[in-house]
Image (cartoon, rainbow, N blue to C red):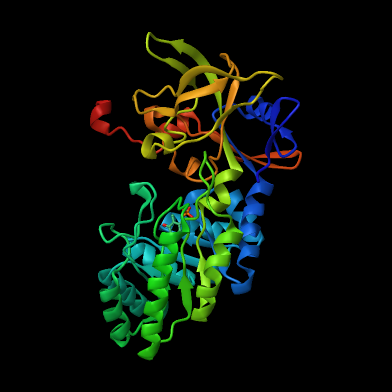
Amino acid sequence: MHEFKYKNNHLYCENIKIEDLAKKFGTPLYVYSYHTLIDHFFKLKNAFKPVDPLICYSVKANSNLAILKALVDKGAGLDIVSGGELYRAKASGVDAKKIVYASVGKTEEEIEKAIRHGILFFNVESIPELELINKVACRLGAKTNVAIRINPDVEPKTHKYITTGKLTNKFGIDFETARIIFLSNNELPHLDICGIHMHIGSQITDSAPYIAALKKIVKFIGELKKRGINLKYLNIGGGLGIIYNKETPQTAKEFSRKIIPVLKSTGLKIIMEPGRFIAGNSGVLITKVLYMKKTPLKNFIIVDGAMNDLVRPSLYGAYHEILPLYNPAGSKRINIKYDVVGPICESGDFLAKDRAVSKISAGEYLAVMSCGAYGFTMSSNYNSRPRACEALVIKNKAFMIRKRESDKDLIRNEHVPNFLLGF
Ligand SMILES: *Cc1c(COP(=O)(O)O)cnc(C)c1O
């Protein structure tokens, strides 16, 4: 369920006509529904109530401070993957003991900042990283919690760029190496290796690989227990898929019903790291039609939003539904198929291909649906396009939560050396 619906032929976000926002804030514009965001958080929280997990929202899905604050206020923790995200997490006011930190390439500086801040634990992805965290903790006179990110070697049946749990991927540690680490814990006196982490990929719509990975891990936890190694945390990652097109992902309820018995059997504190599931359907990208262009072979709708604003179609061939903001009564999808493309100088710059859309003309607006996750956060300034504005809607109120970048922002950090200025 989401809060983007037509009323009197106009697309609304909660109780606000989106076209009014497009006129007020300009386009391209990200619009988020507060209630859709929060509802998805609670959907998961309620579905998993029997194990009372700590839900650490994955910051990289949508890291706007207002989005983080909205979730943190409802009790969410945060899953971070960089020092920059640690900074955002701090700014959101989240309790440090609700932050978990994964990444294959944490720098010494990032590790130090996270230890100083007192995060709940690091999800560690290699032995050299483990040694570095131990060294930094030693220098700071600290003892730090870590969870071992296991690479369970399963095929999650999602796009290969977002598959993370196969042994050919750079993520995590194989079982054999993990066993060695757990059995030699006291060699790293500044670490408490007290958890296991898995995250096998994103946009997973079939629970079988997820369950297969979980079972392998639970078996491993049992083995460790027999050897006298008792863990505290089981972090089951994120990856829950959402509906973009015709996917049929299981609901949070169905998913939880399948895995709760397995989770309970471990007796460990459960951590979850959902990103897309919480933020994905809570946002749309609004773009204005600049030109209708017909070539001998194709029909193009040229819009002011582009791959720099939303890279998912170009990067993953991802499907996003496209709806007109104004859809007058009786206007049906016409039989002509269009490519919806942006102004960027790349043929890979498209938001949709061969799509039948309702009748539309230049000056009108389109909504690219389900852009709340991995939308703005993956945006760039390519072609020197200032990044889009972001707005958050709650009932009949709209707030700008990120100002549109200016031309000045584009060159803000650049320096022309004196020799080029003739000094
Ligand atoms: C990206 C990521 C997530 C979130 O993935 P979603 O598919 O958005 O739920 C969770 N954990 C880790 C370690 C990640 O890298």
**Image position of 216 (left or right of 319):** left
Quarter of the render that holds ligand 1: bottom left
Residue placed farthest to the top in the image? 296
In screen coordinates, is 321 left or right of 354?
right
Quarter of the image where one finds residue 150: bottom left
Residue 372 image offset from top left, x and y in percent: 55, 43
Q: Residue at x 48, y 69 (%)?
A: 117
Along the line of sight, which residue is nearer the eye, 14 or 114?
Answer: 14
User: Which quarter of the rendering shows the C terminus?
Assistant: top left
Q: Judge whether residue 310 can be spotted in this image.
A: yes
Where in the figure is residue 33, as x and y percent of width and height? 65, 43
* Residue 11 on image: x %, y %: 68, 30
Q: Looking at the picture, tell me which residue is in the foreground, 305 or 180.
A: 180
Residue at the image point whose x is 38% and y is 91% from the top: 228
Asked if 156 appears above or below 108 in the picture, the reply is: above
Task: Tally the marks.
Answer: 0
Horizontal side of 320 relative to 152 (left or right) equals right
On screen, 69 above or below 303?
Answer: below
Residue situated in front as seen by the camera: 261 or 190 = 261
- Residues 392 and 407: in front is 392
Quarter where residue 422 is shown: top left
Quarter where residue 143 is shown: bottom left
Residue 111, compared with residue 190, is above or below; it is above
Residue 423 in sight in this render: no
Whether residue 394 is situated above or below residue 43 in the rendered picture: above
Point out residue 22 in the picture as x, y percentages from the top left corner: 63, 27
Residue at 30 percent of width and 85 percent of height: 183
